Amino acid sequence: MRVFLISLFLLLNVAKEGIAKDNFRDSLITAGIRQIYNIKFAQADSTFKLIMRKYPEDPAGVFFDAMIDWWRIMLDLTDEEYDDKFIKGLNKTIDFCNEILDKNPDNVDALFFKGGALGFRGRLYSIRKKFFQAALDAKEALPLVNKVYELDPDNKDVILGFGIYNYYAVAIPEKYPFIKPFMVFFPGGNKKKGLEQLKEVANHGRYAKFESTYFLLQVYYGFEKQFDSALAYDKRLISQFPDNPVFNAYHGRIFAHKGQWKKTAEIFRGIYNKCIAGLPGYNERIKREASYYIGNWYKIDGQMDSAVVYLRIAELLSEKLDQKKQTGFLANSLLYLGMAYDDLGYRQLAIEKYKETLKVKDFHNSHKIAKEYLKQPYVHWKHRNKKKKN
């Protein structure tokens, strides 16, 4: 009996030690994930390097270290500077997991992180419109996700892979019909089911809840055009990460789509101030967008002196940023500057801006409107009666 009690005591101590290690590992991973979303990349790098040193056979550190570059990409999707580094990090994760799986094909962590690496590589390919490569990664990842779920059915994070695949397998061919012929080689998707799975992870996930919430924000904003739903998920993220520039920018864009221009300007005023303060991630693209929406509101409200200040900033930044591909920010900044100059009585400056508008790509009838105001000056409705009297 005494031997049994001693053995039981030793087993309990070993179990407690294992739990403590798991808790410490989990606390490090959770801290690192939060550091990524808070755009504290140097701190996140240190955290995941510590995981790699302390747990050299654990793929978590390698995978999440690569995710730092995923969020560097998220800060400016037009900049492909970090694409190769991110792909290399994911490939390193896949190779790392393969070594583990060669010894133990049922290692849940290796299956999970290999599936995650393939999934995120596919997501980047999708962003870069390399849809066939994205589909191949999704096809390879799906059996791994299924196996993880069979081995560990209580793992909510793994459902993220199901949700993304189920949604994208339908949504992307709908948006890009030329993809449809390739999809006959892949399992069918289900958008409704995909959204339900993403919501489950957002509500109950361990490591993936924030990424799933962000994916839901993107889906409802970009694909579903359900802006109230997008706003709900955006608010959830901002409550956790108030200085994340991506989540803040979505906040302003949602209100712009809802036509609430004063609220849009208020949100982007806060973003603009963070740009001026030099907060991490608040780059020139965010500053350009913020100055544009602030200037747009001043134009709408008839405060043309202030409109000129911010629209001029948006114009100059657009000229710098749009060298490879022109955006609506440049066209509309020029057009709105012309309207502001007209209303202020600077007709020659207005004409110059209208002519510049016609030289850049047409966005939402910018050319048609510019031609109209070349014929007849723009006057804001608040100032029409005043100008008639004068």
Image (cartoon, rainbow, N blue to C red):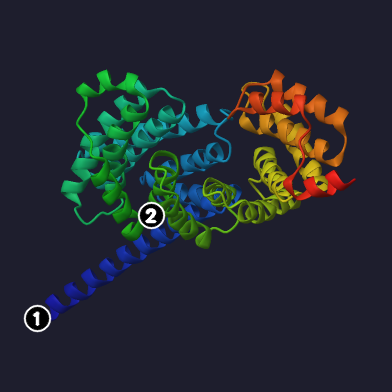
The label number, if any, that marks residue 1 in the structure image: 1
What amino acid type should be assigned to the residue bearing mark 1?
A: Met
Q: Are marks 2 and 1 in contact (CB under 8 Å)?
A: no
Establish if 52 lies above or below 94.
below
- In the shown orientation, is residue 323 left or right of residue 169? right
Disc 1 element? loop
What amino acid type should be assigned to the residue bearing mark 2?
A: Lys
- In the shown orientation, is residue 20 left or right of residue 326? left
- Tell me where residue 283 appears, x and y as whole percent: 67, 41
Residue occupying the far front of the picture = 389
- In the shown orientation, is residue 389 left or right of residue 125? right
- Regarding residue 158, the answer to whether it shows in the image is no
Which sits in the foreground, 20 or 202? 202
Quadrant of the image occupied by residue 101? top left
The residue that disc 2 covers is 209
Q: Residue at x 57, y 41 (%)?
A: 75
Quadrant of the image occupied by residue 93? top left
Q: Residues within 10 Å of mark 1 (few under 14, many from 20)?
A: few
Q: Report the quarter where the N terminus lies.
A: bottom left
- Tell me where residue 10 appears, x and y as whole percent: 23, 71
Establish if 241 lies above or below 338.
below
